[in-house]
Every structure is written in structure tokens, then in C-alpha cells.
Amino acid sequence: MSNGYCLGIESTADDFGVGIVSFKGEILTNINNSYIPEKGGIHPREAARHHADVAGKVITEALKRSKIEPKDLTLIAFSQGPGLGPCLRTGATAARSLALYLNLPLVGVNHCVAHIEIGKLTTGATDPLTLYVSGGNTIVSAYELGKYRIFGETLDIAVGNCLDVFVRELGIKFEGGKAPGRIVEELAAKGKKYIPLPYTVKGMDLSFSGLLTAAVSLLKEKKCNIEDVCFSFQETAFSMLTEVTERALAHTEKKEVLLTGGVAANSRLQAMLKIVCEEHNARFFVVPKEYSADNGVMIAWTGILSYLHGITVPVEKSFVRTKWRLDEVEVPWVEKRSLN
Ligand code: AMP
Ligand code: MG
């Protein structure tokens, strides 16, 4: 079936997003409403309250902007995990209500798979080695025998979370909704001196907590300027990511590399990976900025891919899965696409 539309709901963490996508892969609308904590990190129950408050408004606005009627929808998809329990449950409740009210099938989407699939849809990559870097995840993966296999991942915090906590510790206010990682990127561009920081790669896995602690203490001791610390922070964290990606690329011999997730917006990380791709004769793809951070479009598109392969979930079994790993998910649609 090539006609139809899916409405996708994303709510794994701070973002409540709704996207509407056609079965042909045309993106009709992408609306996001983010929870911004007054201080500190994401409080799961407060974020969930935010999502419940804005859900109706965001869904209505998404339908209005897409210029389709609810009756034109074929399918409802929601991010089923991994993520923060209260946030996931709020999105799932909205998705279940819509599916029941409109009498439509429901698909539970794995959030990590969705970040990969939106990268492939928007860049044209078909069978990439993927570096997925965001506020909640840091994963190097590639498709092999029915699943996206994990070649390397963080052992503690995600690289995006590392950047976010670092910026909070600096006491910088997030002006105009600017992403913390973007603030570090701007300051790093003015840095000149590299200060050695903990570089932790264990086998194919990574650890960022030592780097975070060391960078924060450097600043608190006021021995170095902030631009140099941001520069050194980025050089260290992104070199670690690039090293693991390069080794996975050499092992898998994939011909494409895809950078996806919120941190993909960083131009320094992009530049490092581009060099690796040139050295290994691989094509380099970066997800467009509007789809790099969490969004409902990626959920809608992955919902369509799943549905077209017979994957749906009855409402009574649509429990959220807070720890649902990328490599547990069957992705039957990939084989055909990666072999063409
Ligand atoms: P996500 O979890 O996919 O919604 O992405 C959000 C993460 O992306 C946060 O940790 C942000 O700090 C990070 N981020 C956004 N823009 C940039 C950037 N230019 N450089 C580094 N990190 C970024
Ligand atoms: Mg987010």
C-alpha cells in the first residue's frame, strides 16, 4: 500500500513532538514543544506533566498545518522506548486515545531505530554505519542479519548529556532556547589551547563521566579560560567517538557513514567524521538539523516501515519499554533496501 498517512508521537524525554508523514515518505509537518526545567536537569514527572499539558495543542496544530483531516490518517505511531517512564507513558496515552477514537492501528516504535531511519530517509543513505549521538544515547551501529547491531556504546552517560551537564555547571543560562551543545560549540570555536582531559575508550565502548568531572574542575579552579576548556572538551569527546566509529567502519566495511541524533548538529564532530570517511572511501551523511534532535516525524516514518511489514501492537499490549535496546528490534524492511 503506498497511500496513507501516519501521525507519530515522540515523548521519550524533554521533547513532545508530533510529525505527520505520508507512506511515500513525504514529511507534511513536524511540531515540537520542549520542556525547559527552571533549574537542573530533566525531572521526569515534571516533563511528563508538560507533555500532558501541551499534547492536545501540538496534535491539533500538527493536523492543521499538514492540511489533512483526522479521517485521512491510516496509522498512529508512538515512541515506546527507551526513555523516561513518565514521559513515555504520556505520549503512549495520547497515541492510544487517538488510535481508539479514530479506530486506527497502533505501532510502538523504538526511538533509536527511528533516529537511524529518519537519517536514511532524509539523506538517501541505504546501508550506513551509524553514529547516533544524543542527550540520552551514544551508539555506533550497523545493520546485519535482521537487526541494527551495536558495535560500541557509552558505558555511562551519553555525550549529549555530558555536554548539557557541563553547560549547567558553567552556570550559563540557555538563552533563546539554544541547545547546550551549541553553546559549547560556539565557545570552542574561540579556543586555542588544547588542555589534556580524560580520553576513555574501552574496547569499542566509551565513557564520558571522567571527562565531565575533569572539565568541570578545571573551570571551578579558574586556571584556564572557558573557551580553551570547551575546545579541549569537544576535541577529546569527539575524538573518542571518531575512533570507535572508524574501527567499526574498518570492521564492517560499510560504504556509508550516517551521523544522527541531536549532537549531529555539531560542525566539529561532522568535520572529524568527514576525514575518516575520506580515508575509508565511504560516503558521509548528516541528518538535517530539523530532524537531528528528537521529533515526531522519525516516529511516524518508522511506524510506516513497521506497519508495511505487518508490525502493529494492540492497545492492551502497548506498554512502554524504558530500557528497550536498539539491537533487540527486528527491522524486516532494511534487508530489501540495503541490498538494492
Ligand atoms: P536529542 O536528545 O536527540 O533530542 O538531542 C539533544 C542533544 O543534542 C542535547 O544534548 C543538546 O545539547 C545536543 N546538541 C544540540 N545541538 C548541538 C550542537 N550544535 N553541538 C553539540 N550538541 C548539540
Ligand atoms: Mg530531546
Image: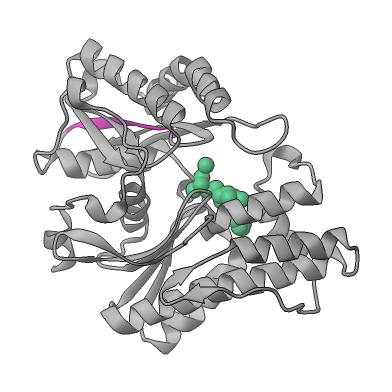
30 versus 156 height, above or below: above
Quarter of the C terminus within the rendering: bottom left
Rendering coords of residue 49 (x, y %): 53, 19
Position of 143 with respect to 64 (left or right) is: left
Decide whether residue 7 is among the magenta residues: yes
Q: Is residue 267 above or below residue 277?
A: above
- Residue at 58% from the left image edge and 51% from the top image edge: 161
Question: Horizontally, is 222 left or right of 120 in the view?
Answer: right
Residue 174 x, y percent position in the rendering: 73, 42
Q: Residue at x 14, y 59 (%)?
A: 146
Residue 108: x %, y % from top left? 25, 34
Number of marks present in the image shown: 0
Specify whether residue 190 is in view.
no
Viewer-proximal residue among 54 and 49: 49
| Pick the front one: 69 or 58 | 58
Q: What range of the chain is rendered magenta?
A: 4-11
Quadrant of the rendering where the N terminus is positioned: top left
Majority SS type along the magenta span: strand
